[in-house]
Amino acid sequence: GWPRPAALVFLGVVNAIAGYVHADVRVEGRGDHAGATPMGLRLDPTTVRAETVLELERLPLDYRPYVQGIRDETEALGQVVTNFLGFARPTELALAPVEMTALVERAADELRADVRTRGGEVIVSGQFGRVEGDEVLLRQALSNLCRNAFEACDQARIVPRIAIDGHWDEVHGVLRISVSDNGPGVPDNIADRVFRPFFTTKAQGTGLGLALVQKIVVTHNGRVTVTNDDGGGARFVVT
């Protein structure tokens, strides 16, 4: 079993997490989730992390790996909770003109550090224009698509090359953004399921990243599709 000090820290973390659990979030959706009423979760990983840091400094060196493991799992749990709440919460749009070029560049910059550590690159091209939308949600959707592309390459041990391309039809006010990668692509037998909530092919995946993308895009009266490029890799297109 765990050394007693580490076990006590674990119990402290559990208690901290429990303090953020409330049954007040309901899924308001259709299809596979009609009528679902899961327990709502509110978790502040920063608080839990702070508590483990304080304990970490007071533990002998031999015990610290146990506590570090708790911190790592807490961060992973926090991401799961964040994704779940983002999907479960009814979407309320804060509409305003959004400069999509700046938004795309920001999403690309957020990913570049990770991509470069694998020897890869993120390329932005095309025109993105200005649309009426919720800037925070649109950036989250694009970031999720970029992260998905990176993880697909990383899981396949492929040096990632991620391309974000925009086509702005000013006459009709229509924007098309594609996010493509050089990974293994999406198998034909699961292509129609990748946007379903909780469907994932990743060992550590939650199955909510792409589902949230679709929810955000549809809420903006758009659509998102996925195909495989002839040269390999997946291409997600948002219009």
Image: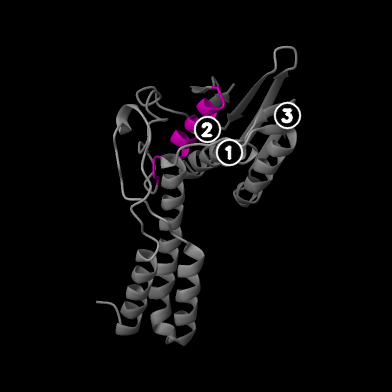
Q: Is residue 9 among what the camera can see?
A: yes
Hey, what amino acid is under mark 1? Answer: Leu
Marks 1 & 2, CB-CB < 8 Å contact: yes
> Which residue is the site of mark 3?
125
Q: Which quadrant of the view contains residue 22?
A: bottom left
Dominant SS of magenta comes to: helix
Position of residue 9 in the picture relative to residue 56 (left or right): left
Q: Which mark is residue 169?
A: none
Label 1 Cα neighbours within 10 Å, binned few <14 / some 14-19 / many ≥20:
many
Residue 127 image position (x, y, % from top left): 75, 25
Callout 3: SS:
strand
Instruction: Measure the alpha-carbon separation of dots 3 and 2.
Output: 23 Å
- As drawn, is 172 to the left or to the right of 14? right
- Viewer can see residue 234: no
Q: What amino acid is found at the position of numbered circle 2 in the picture? A: Ile
Cα–Cα gap, marks 1 and 2: 7 Å
Residue located beneath label 2 in the image: 216
Task: Pick whichever, 181 or 60, lies toward us.
Answer: 60
Label 2 residue SS: helix
Residue at image position (50%, 43%) is 151
Relative to 109, is 233 on the left or the right?
left
Q: Picture coordinates of residue 112 (x, y %)?
A: 66, 46
Residue identified by numbered label 1: 137
Q: Residues within 10 Å of mark 2 (few under 14, many from 20)?
A: many
